[in-house]
Image (cartoon, rainbow, N blue to C red):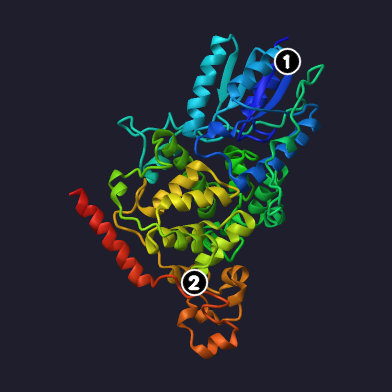
Amino acid sequence: MSPVLVWFRQDLRVADNPALHAACEAGEPVYPLFIWAPEEEGAWAPASASRYWLHHSLAALDAALRALGSALTIRAGASLAAITAFAREVGARRVYWNRRYEPAAVERDGLLEQALADAGIDARSFKGGLLFEPREVRTNAGEPFKVFTPFWRQCLKQPEPEAPLPVPRRIPAPARWPASRVLAELKLLPRVDWAGGIRQSWPVGEAGARAALDRFLAQGIDGYAQCRDRPDLDGVSRLSPYLHFGEVSPRQVWAAVCARELDAGRMSLSASAAGYLRQLGWREFAHHLLFHFRATPAQPMREEYAAFPWLDDAHQLECWERGRTGYPIVDAGMRELWTTGWMHNRVRMIAASFLVKDLLVHWRHGARWFWDTLVDADLANNTLGWQWTAGCGADAAPYFRIFNPVSQAERFDPDGAYVRKWVPELARLPDRHLHSPWRAPDDVLAAAGVRLGAEYPHPMVEHDLARQRALDAWQRMRGMRR
């Protein structure tokens, strides 16, 4: 017999798992393996919210494997040493895994594949996390894309994503299971239980991912085009953490959306369905950029932005992190993030713009805070989002985009339901003053029980002045490049 090791990473599912499927097809004993090696992630080891999710996702994966007659073995330490030691221990001559695309993971996996081959072990990797391989989608000149629309157009010229693989009927089990670390020994959970809001907001695991997808297909996708920018409405899929941890695959989502359209009798995708699949395309684009431009988590893609004159005020950064900026839509988003580990995408853009444009705090500080607090902390998506907002990344506007937090709030939270939920001290303000309470007359503030500077802060900056300051800084940067 030649047992097969299946190395789980960000693919914590049994359905549509190419590495697991191939191992089961071999007909020999299969050893599912997870290795805790945060030091191999470089500067981007899983942070607090991600570690909480990972703990519960691993527990869910083990339960799913046991239902199929298998079990998850957990080890810790350097991946190469752990895998080679495990392979010797069980006599395995094959190691399968699904590919990752972050720079540290790509480098590590390449070294590992070569070392295993040198040791006479068959190492095979599979496409399980993306619809399209970053190596395969190129411009006509053979270069990586830097603009989304032509990138996605090229993706759509590729063959249709393969149909998802089914859950294995059974996973061939060995006669004896090796020793495993106990999940609690990894110490992924904090000593103080701060994650009550995350626990209430998210059912972690593959079953939670399926439930979220089913709910979105039944209740959300038809109105997605109209509602996706409204944080006050339940108009988005909320699949991002499940996709990041691989509890659902992008081709499962793709196939489910297309099947739902067919079931509705549509010969072509509706605007809402196409718009949602386009958002999967943005996820693909983010990984495409990170794969080809490895320095972007720390350095601007547009090199001239290295000279941008950031102010980096630590006190202002802390006020932003805690949702005490004096701009209700920004504060609502930051409090939602702190409580649930997630923030609506429209509000992410508003909050990020406020930090880098109104406060002139470097985008890297915002990216790090999101990395620490998001349950969907994904290096590719996080990097793309922050560089896009700062204007220094791919697909940037030809002008210096600055969001107005008041007009954005009035447009996308018109009845104030989102702000009232997350900034309850302002809940009694009338709609016309809710998004700019500093403009409300004193008697209106008093009637609502709001004292600016007490229950709720004064605005940190005056947006029009901050906007002009940001434009002046941008012009100075451009002048330095001439």
Give the mark toward the camera: 2 or 1.
2
Identity of the residue drawn at 68% across and 47% down? 190
Mark 2 secondary-structure assignment: loop
Spot occupied by residue 285 in the image (x, y as percentages of width and height): 44, 41
Please give the count of numbered marks on the rendered protein: 2
Identity of the residue drawn at 67% across and 41% down? 188
| 81 w.r.t. 390: above or below | above
Mark 1 secondary-structure assignment: loop
Q: Which residue is mark 2?
A: 326
Label 2 crowd bin: few (<14), some (14–19), many (20+), radius 10 Å: many
Q: Are marks 2 and 1 in contact (CB under 8 Å)?
A: no
Spot occupied by residue 200 in the image (x, y as percentages of width and height): 72, 56
Indicate the quadrant where residue 162 lies: top right
Left or right? Give the position of 332 relative to 357.
right
Q: Amino acid at mark 2?
A: Gly
Identity of the residue drawn at 58% across and 21% down? 80
Q: Which residue is mark 1?
A: 28
Left or right? Give the position of 181 relative to 355.
right
Spot occupied by residue 305 in the image (x, y as percentages of width and height): 31, 49
> Which one is in front, 389 or 408?
389
